[in-house]
Amino acid sequence: MKNLEFKNGDKMPVIGLGTWKSKPKEVEKAVEHALKNGYRHIDCAAVYGNETEVGNALQNVFKEGKVKREEVWVTSKLWNNAHKKEDVIPALKNTLNDLKLDYLDLYLMHWPVAFRPGLEGFPEKDEDFLSLEEVPLIETWNAMLEAKKQGLVKHVGVSNFSINKLKSLSKETSQIPEMNQVELHPYLHQDELLKYCKENNIHLTAYSPLGSGDRSDDMKAENEPSLLENDTIKEIAEKHNASAGQILITWAVQRGTAVIPKSTNEKRIVENLESAEVSLDKEDLEKIKKLDKHFRYVTGEFFVTEGNSYSNIYDE
């Protein structure tokens, strides 16, 4: 298994198990199965509503003694309702309590969006949001750095940040994000962002690498394109005697990013990890290069109300 290496020598396995959209009852079994079959990277978030069950799975596996805590890379994310400096560490401690861990390997600012403190669920009106003038990203970031200083997390980063937002944050801090987790797949290559992050020693993790076909209908566009049913991807998969999902995961890995496919299907979980054995050649990569249409499955439109300032969250 390949790894992404951090400045201090810590290594994050490039293929992890994503837990977004995994139902609490299913995610516990999925995480246990993943760890028992070779996964050493689990990606979580407070807003997924299943960290307690992920924590149960981690403890069950650790108690068996075959996998140690220090062998597993665990990532979680700060939700938007805890961006004020006084709320960041309490939110992190809640996540640690749910996951039944003493520390996280990586903690990310989930979105460059701030909600009213304590807001449950998603905002429904302008008053539920705080602007980035009211709670600047640097305020949240400095609190995350304090969490690192306290030993609650080993590494800190961001998620869903554009080049512009990375540049703005970098100007205000001496410790730039170590990771940016963003949507990446053959319909959304984001080559400029990939280049910028590589040049500035910021790792990238690809979410929704398979197209997130199981997300709720209200998040889907009409007639949105399927990655798993794409003819080019299926053709390359047949050539390599692999699944379409394995081709999509391999593509992400060969670009130098980490990738976190979600699954609760035991066969699929193992199959996704076995993508590490697949290798795409130059011809394959040229064909996939032609698929880029800058199409987002996660548009960010769920953060837009009539009068707030988040209508162009990706700065495009």
Image (cartoon, rainbow, N blue to C red):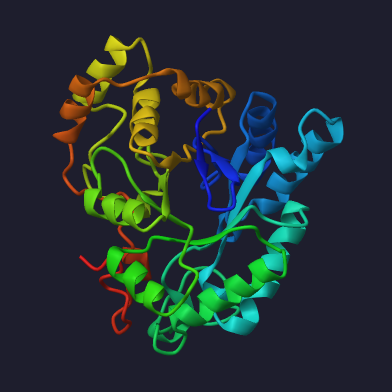
Q: Residue at x 57, y 81 (%)?
A: 117
> Looking at the image, is 38 positioned above or below residue 313?
above
Tell me which corner region of the image, top left, top right, bottom left or bottom right, holds residue 236: top left
Front position in the image: 119 or 13: 13
| Residue 1 visible here | yes
Tell me which corner region of the image, top left, top right, bottom left or bottom right, holds residue 282: top left
* x and y, in percent, of residue 307 in the image: 30, 84
Front position in the image: 162 or 232: 162
50 left or right of 272 in image = right
* x and y, in percent, of residue 182 in the image: 38, 53
Q: Residue at x 59, y 71 (%)?
A: 144
Image quadrant where one finds the C terminus = bottom left
Tell me which corner region of the image, top left, top right, bottom left or bottom right, holds residue 29: top right
> Looking at the image, is 20 positioned above or below residue 307?
above
Q: Residue at x 80, y 42 (%)?
A: 59
Q: How many marks?
A: 0
* x and y, in percent, of residue 239 in the image: 27, 11
12 left or right of 258 in image = right
Question: Residue reaching furthest left?
Answer: 290
| Residue 119 visible here | no
> Looking at the image, is 248 positioned above or below residue 89?
above
Q: Residue at x 44, y 66 (%)?
A: 111
Question: Residue reaching furthest front?
Answer: 8
> Looking at the image, is 43 positioned above or below residue 264?
below
* x and y, in percent, of residue 313 in the image: 30, 69
